[in-house]
Image (cartoon, rainbow, N blue to C red):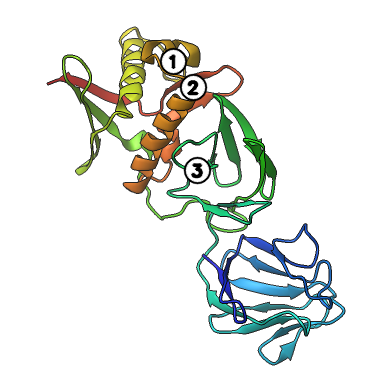
Amino acid sequence: MGALLGLDTGREELLPARCLVGRSRACDLILAARDVSSQHAIVQWTGAVWELQDLGSRNGTIVGEHRLAFGERVPLRRGLVLRFGREAGAFEFVDDAPPRPMAIHLDSGRIRIAEAGLLALPDDDSPELLLYPDGPERWVGERHGELTEVGDRAVVLVRGEMWRVHLPTGGSGTWEEHASDLCVADLRLRFSHSSDEEYVELLALAGERRIDLQARAHHYPLLLLARARLADQQRGVAEPEQGWVHQDKLLAMLKIEPGHLNISIHRSRAQLGQAGVADAARLVERRKGTRQLRLGAAQVEIVRV
């Protein structure tokens, strides 16, 4: 993803799709130098290239040897040196890759970057808030079984700490992290389990492609959701209504707390995303306002080994 390297500090600054540079705390790249304007310039992704625009700063924005006029936009290429005013250190533009979804901790500056289109806060080990795209122009946040729409640059509260999220959409970048056209709807999921169900193996099939997800503890909630989906199919329930289970019922069946379920779902989605499925978040679907969830794949097989 796009990045600037501070030539004085040696620190690399990762760029969100729209990076506001200046002295104000509202900026994404905050520079303390006295001659930097409160909102000095913007580095932003156009969908094809990164470009820099001066916002009418008093002491100027310089690219190489060229000082930008007010409002002037210039495309950036690797190796260009940028200056914001005279006193702040110079930056080199070192990475021209498209932006990726990310979150910045507002107190510490710690950065979380999405993996396979999934952004977990505060971390992957015990996520409270899961963010993922619901189409090229919309992101949703999933917390405690509830869904809310989350916009680019929104500030979210997670365990008492504030994060600003940067969520590229179809208009500002690539909302998917890879060009895979393999989707959850294309998959046939084959579950194999032992008689005591302590061992659950999962294989995802799409045409001639096989994704071996191996045996994992986090497959067990998926197995229960798969059974609910198959039972509704056998009763002739229409596809949009198949397999929905209330979260409280699923928790009682699993004998776990909501936080444990969130971790299992995140691990299942992340594993599928890392295997190249573009919309891995749809492996488990949630119905807004109902606390219901279901297995996103309609083609399911369950075998006992």
Q: Is residue 276 above or below residue 231?
A: below
Q: Are there few (<14), some (14-19), or many (20+) residues within 10 Å of tag 3? A: few
Horizontally, residue 151 falls left or right of residue 258, namely right
Task: Say which residue appears at 33% left-offset and 37% top-offset.
Answer: 186
The secondary element bearing badge 2 is classed as helix
Q: Position of residue 82 (x, y in %)?
A: 66, 82
Query: Are the two marked residues, 2 and 1, in contact with CB atoms closer than 8 angstroms?
Result: yes
Residue holding disc 2:
258
Give the mark nearest the N terminus, 3 or 2: 3
Q: Which residue ends up furthest to the top in the rendered image?
A: 235
Horizontally, residue 253 falls left or right of residue 289, namely left
Front residue of this view, candidates 201 and 29 = 29
Residue holding disc 3:
123
Give the mark nearest the N terminus, 3 or 1: 3
Q: Quadrant of residue 17?
A: bottom right
Q: CA distance from mark 2 to mark 1?
A: 7 Å
* Badge number at residue 38: none
* Badge number at residue 251: 1
The secondary element bearing badge 3 is classed as loop
Whether residue 304 is visible, yes or no, is yes
Whether residue 133 is visible, yes or no, is no
